[in-house]
Image: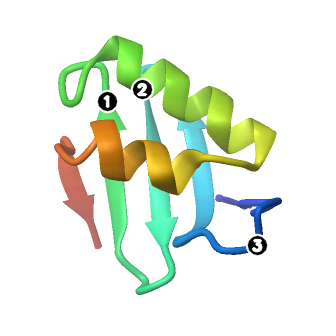
Amino acid sequence: MQAYRNLAGNSGVRAFEVLRDGIRVRFANGATYLYDHRVPGREHVEEMKRLAVAGRGLSSYIAQFGGDYAEKVE
């Protein structure tokens, strides 16, 4: 996983890993979730990937549109 740049300075996201069909996101509480093209869907996952690489807006986007996840990763 790579560190999330957190350009806004107040994100709950700490790290992410871009996958071919998804993205893994690690939050400040240590929980890691997989979001993929099945859940919450291709459109949301591709936007999450874009925001993750940009370093801004990922946590807010997940809170607003990506609350459903494919699985919790230990």
Residue 25 in the image, given as x and y percentages of width and height:
47, 56
Residue at image location 32% in from the left, 44% down from the top? 64
Among the two numbered marks 3 and 1 on one chain, the one whose residue lies closer to the N terminus:
3
Among the two numbered marks 2 and 3 on one chain, the one whose residue lies closer to the N terminus:
3
Mark 3, other Cα within 10 Å: few <14 / some 14–19 / many ≥20:
few
Q: Secondary structure at mark 2?
A: helix
Observer-side mark, 3 or 1, equals 3
Query: Which mark, by number, is residue 7?
Result: none
Looking at the image, residue 67 sits to the left or right of residue 32; the answer is left
Provide the residue designation for mark 2. Answer: 45
Compared to residue 6, the image places residue 68 above or below, namely above
Provide the residue designation for mark 3. Answer: 9
Q: Quadrant of residue 1?
A: bottom right
Distance (Cα) linking label 2 and label 1: 6 Å
Residue projecting furthest to the bottom: 29
Mark 1, other Cα within 10 Å: few <14 / some 14–19 / many ≥20:
many
Provide the residue designation for mark 1. Answer: 36
Distance (Cα) linking label 2 and label 3: 22 Å
Residue projecting furthest to the top: 43
Q: Secondary structure at mark 3?
A: loop
